[in-house]
Amino acid sequence: MLRGFATISFWAEDLEAAKVWYADLLGVQPYFERPGYYEFRVGDYQGELGLIDSRYAPGGSATGPAGAVMYWHVDDVKGALERLLSKGAREYQPYTERGMGFITASVVDPFGNILGIMYNPHYLEVLSSISTA
């Protein structure tokens, strides 16, 4: 039923500032733009990170960090965490070794969204099997 991550949406009260922050973080500009929405393609599988003007958030949406954490694979969790913190994000979950090579951390971006980062050996195994197929 669930075939893979497609898009994650982050809300931002200051959408233009969020666009600049994420473009700098990701090293790319949004590939898709429309009023109130920017979308970036990110990573090995070109997952989509959407930034949406918070005026369009569904009624009852949390106005601060809440809910599930979406983790993006990174090769260096400590380095990625330091970079995020240096850009103004604040720690949400500290650097945590989970065992068997899995490491996680998460931050709250300057716009109130939780951004998870993770070193995930399984991710690399899957990527390697696809790359060699």
Image (cartoon, rainbow, N blue to C red):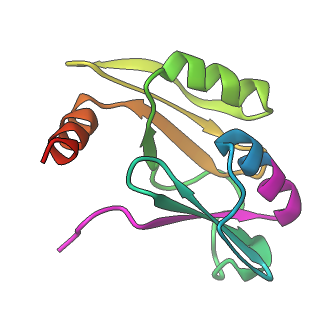
Q: Which quadrant of the figure contains the N terminus?
A: bottom left
Kindly identify the residue that appears in the image at 65 percent across and 44 percent down: 26
Q: Position of residue 99 (x, y in %)?
A: 24, 17
- Between 57 and 47, the residue placed more toward the observer is 47
Left or right? Give the position of 133 relative to 70.
left
Q: Position of residue 30 (x, y in %)?
A: 69, 63
User: Total label count?
Assistant: 0
Q: Quadrant of residue 17?
A: bottom right
Residue 74 colored in magenta in the image: no
Left or right? Give the position of 6 relative to 116.
left
Residue 13 colored in magenta in the image: yes
Image height check: is 64 above or below 16?
above
Image height check: is 9 above or below 77?
below
Q: Position of residue 132 (x, y in %)?
A: 16, 41
The magenta-colored residue range is 1-20
- Between 133 and 82, the residue placed more toward the observer is 133
